[in-house]
Amino acid sequence: MLSPEATTKIDYELTKYPADQRQAAVMSALRIVQTERGWLSKESITEVAQYLGMPEIAAMEVATFYNMYDLSPVGKYKVTICTNISCMLRGSDEIVSHLQNKLGVGFNEVTSDGKFCLKEGECMGCCGGAPLMHVNNTEMHEFLTTDKVDAIIEGLK
Amino acid sequence: MLNIEIDGKSIEVEHGSTIIDAADKVGIAIPRFCYHPKLSVAANCRMCLVQVEKFNKPLPACATPVADGMKIFTRSKSAIEAQQSVMEFLLINHPLDCPICDQGGECDLQDVAVAYGVSGSRYTEEKRVVFNKNIGPLVSTDMTRCIQCTRCVRFLKEVGGMQELGMIGRGEHAEITAYVDKSVNSELSGNIIDLCPVGALTSKPFRYSARSWELTRRPSIAAHDSLGSHIEVHVKDNKVMRVLPREKESINECWLSDRDRFSYEGLNSPDRLKVPMIKHNGAWVETDWKTALEFAAGQLKDITNEHGGEALGVLVSPNSTMEEGFLAKKLANGLACGNVDYRLRQTDFRLDGKRLGTPWMGCNIHEIEELDRIIVIGSNLRNEHPLLAQRFRRAVANGAELSVVSPLDNDPLMDIAHKVIVRPNDMVNVLGQILKAMSGLQRLSLCLPPSLTALLDDIKVRPNTQAIAESLAGHGKDYDLIAPKVGIFLGNMALSDPRFTEMYSMAEAIGGITGAKGGILPAAANSTGMHMMGVMPSSTGMHARAMLEIPRKAYLLLNIEPELDCQHAALAKAAMEKAECVVALTTYKSQALDNADILLPITPFTETSGTFMSMEGRVQSFAAAVRPLGESRPAWKVLRVLANTLGLAGFDFESSEQVKDAIFAGEKPSAVVWRSLNNNLRELVEIQVNIKHDGLQRIGEVPQYESDPIVRRSPPLQKTKYNIKPMARMCSRQLAALDLVEGDHVLVKQDKGSAVLTVRLDDHVAMGCVRVAAAHEATIGLGELMGDITVEKLSPQQLLDINKNITEARA
Ligand code: SF4
Ligand code: FES
Ligand code: FES
């Protein structure tokens, strides 16, 4: 069951589209549910689809298409590091290996305390600040160095 | 009109057409995978790239609208390069396992690769593997072969009405799948096999049984619903291997329902009766045709001589051909018997003698799409007419408003504008309300016959019926239509209803006021043909129900299993038990024919020539696709020889064509049909609008894969989720009223018969009704399809006792 808070938020998103086009709000709805539950289980996708009156598989298509939707648990903090061309040229590899050593997990793995998960990201459209990463899809950090990364992770603990 | 040039050929095309349409028009081949004229344009395979003058890169022909003066090159250097590159890309992840692929020999990918690809690949890296999905008993998947054209996804969404497949993931990880572990349940699912350009989706029943080049293709006509779909029967070694649609734009387009596509699996069922049989001291003995026919003729003659022709009852399946029906009737008449009928699932015969002609659907099939307002009465469209439903779906997608009056609220997978879900008995009243509301609408206030006007006085119009009336009159959600094209159709549930006559008359009156097209949607492949030839009782004869209610001494059954095909299973069974002699012309040995005395093996539609007449009155003849199995013979021949043996005159037909000529008296069939089809009534019948009815009413729907003997024996269809054991299905309110919960066992009773069923919650069922499927062994003890029914809860102890009794009785 979607929580009342989630449905209120989804209902607000729905006001942006014609009443007979509820499906249009699927991206927002998935985001809202993911934020609330941490990740999108099959059940969550089903609930969103049912709430919007669309086929479950169509909601699934959307959820699997965008990699900001997480289809398995990602721990408390999801750290996504861009590894595309600009960030790579500016040393993202080093950031990645530093983080992997520090947290003891590879990409798509969650630390044993359930706090951190590392994800490989695609170009975030801010190549000017490369190398960069974001935390939980919402908080972006630019011009990374290993020291800066340590400080950020420390701040999250 | 626009003038363009393709490969140097100048042509004129309409505004808005795409390059691929234009090229198709002049017969220039452009390779394609994702494009399909009946589906939306996805333009994701890129196989159709062509060069267009003034554009510096190739354009997809399927998604590029033509512009005036456009010059298109499909075989220029740039086009060929593009085609070769796309082909190379498409094959990167394709397994190239043609030798073990069922599509081999009829594969678009193979053909296009040969015609437009290069001979080798530069890709030496690893290919990806996609796991196969189990999407049900009809379609088999090999998803590694998929090229992501999404035709299957678009078909199910746009034509099937429900997106059951989707493409999840992205880029290299994209794959086609149903949601989690679901199967594809569309009743049109087989079409995705035809649509899939590669061997990713193939036919499960046909799989690995033949190569396409070994098959002989024979045209035929589908033998189940009354749409009259054109089919192609594929034959190897005198055996039907599969059935595919044959394109016929005005009827089935390029589609086929699963029932018509997979029923062939029942043709070679182990149940097939291969030799004539006679019951001797309670045991069946095989015999030869001569003995069997002479015995049958002798019995029929003795009984009719002694007790008169009325002692015989002739029950004809509406799935039999016109020739068979005609001869059955002629034979009966030759024995001075007027008891002939094909309307086995009808309860109400009050319209007999009051019709001006043969009832039909009242318009052409493709006209449904053009309707603005539609009302469907007593029909579970997807169950009864799976492919026709798709035309309604298109109408609704085009903006038509659909109203439904029915005891069942099953989702037709299209938007319903207004619906009234009530018990069958109240449907007459509901139609009366609509009529009354309509006659009150200003623009429509026509004079109704005084008898009707008086009736309507007692009716109270409710808001939902008012809404339907306004919709039919042209008022709409967004704007009003001055002269809407209205369609009004009655389905199987209405046809089997004990008050069909009244519903029909009301519908006719509503149709009259709105100038609607429409009529009945006949249930079976040849219902319309049987009616037109008058395979019905003579003025003194008995109709199908009466023949069972007042048991006859002898019966002649043509292609039926009485308990499964008649509207009153228990009566049918009793009548057969009681009869002195039952001669059954049947394709199958069947438990339902245990009470017969003589079984004469007849061929199914693939082994005989014949004619069906469709719901729109199309007379369609077909030839046999294969030779008869064993000793079985086409029913028209059996009837002819039986008549000869009986010494009846006028039965010297040499071919089914001669029989057809006799049916149409040498005239052009269409001329006869034109004269005969007429939905109007000669006189009004007596209608009562306020009959109170308190007890429960049965909704004895015939599930689509139980509709006739062939379908009932098709294993793949029986494995679909439509084949559910009959249960006592009721809505939650009804369950609460009876103090039942899902899973309880109940004893349902009708007349003297009963059945023990499990209770199932089904909120599609109207209050006051119990949905108990018919045409199934579990419910052959019950009575009328739409009759009264009672439900008693069984305690665990009672259930045990009953089961014990049954086991004892069996022993
Ligand atoms: S399964 Fe067949 S029809 Fe469906 S996307 Fe793949 S190739 Fe196309
Ligand atoms: S490449 Fe990393 S943000 Fe663009
Ligand atoms: S047919 Fe045009 S892109 Fe597939």
Image (cartoon, coloured by chain):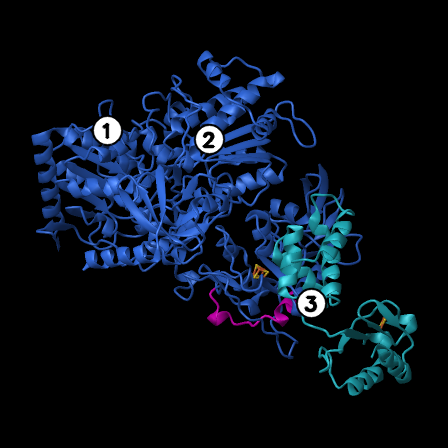
Chain colours: A cyan, B blue
Q: SS at mark 3?
A: helix
**What's the chain of the residue with tag 1?**
B
Tally of numbered tags = 3
> The disc labelled 3 sits on which kind of residue?
Gly
Badge 1 crowding class, 10 Å Cα cut-off, few under 14, some 14 to 19, many 20 or more, is many
Magenta run includes residue B95? yes
**What's the chain of the residue with tag 2?**
B
Q: Tell me where residue B186 appears, x and y as whole percent.
A: 51, 52
Q: SS at mark 2?
A: helix
Residues at discs 1 and 3 both on one chain: yes
> The disc labelled 1 sits on which kind of residue?
Met
Tag 2 near tag 1, CB within 8 Å: no
> The disc labelled 2 sits on which kind of residue?
Met
Which residue lies at the image location 89% right of the left edge and 71% below the top edge? A127
Where does label 2 land, which residue?
A: B427
Where does label 1 land, which residue?
A: B542
Magenta run includes residue B247? no
Q: Earlier in the sequence, mark 1 or mark 3?
A: 3
Q: In this view, does B447 lie above or below B116?
A: above
Where does label 3 land, which residue?
A: B171
Highlighted range, magenta: B87-102
Estimate the spatial distance between the alpha carbons at disc 2 and disc 1, rounded to whole Å. Answer: 28 Å
Q: SS at mark 1?
A: loop
Which residue lies at the image location 58% right of the left edge and 37% below the top edge? B395
**What's the chain of the residue with tag 3?**
B
Q: In this view, does B745 lie above or below B341?
A: below
- Nearer to us of marks 2 and 3 is 2
Q: Earlier in the sequence, mark 2 or mark 1?
A: 2
Asked if residue B604 can be seen in this view, the reply is yes
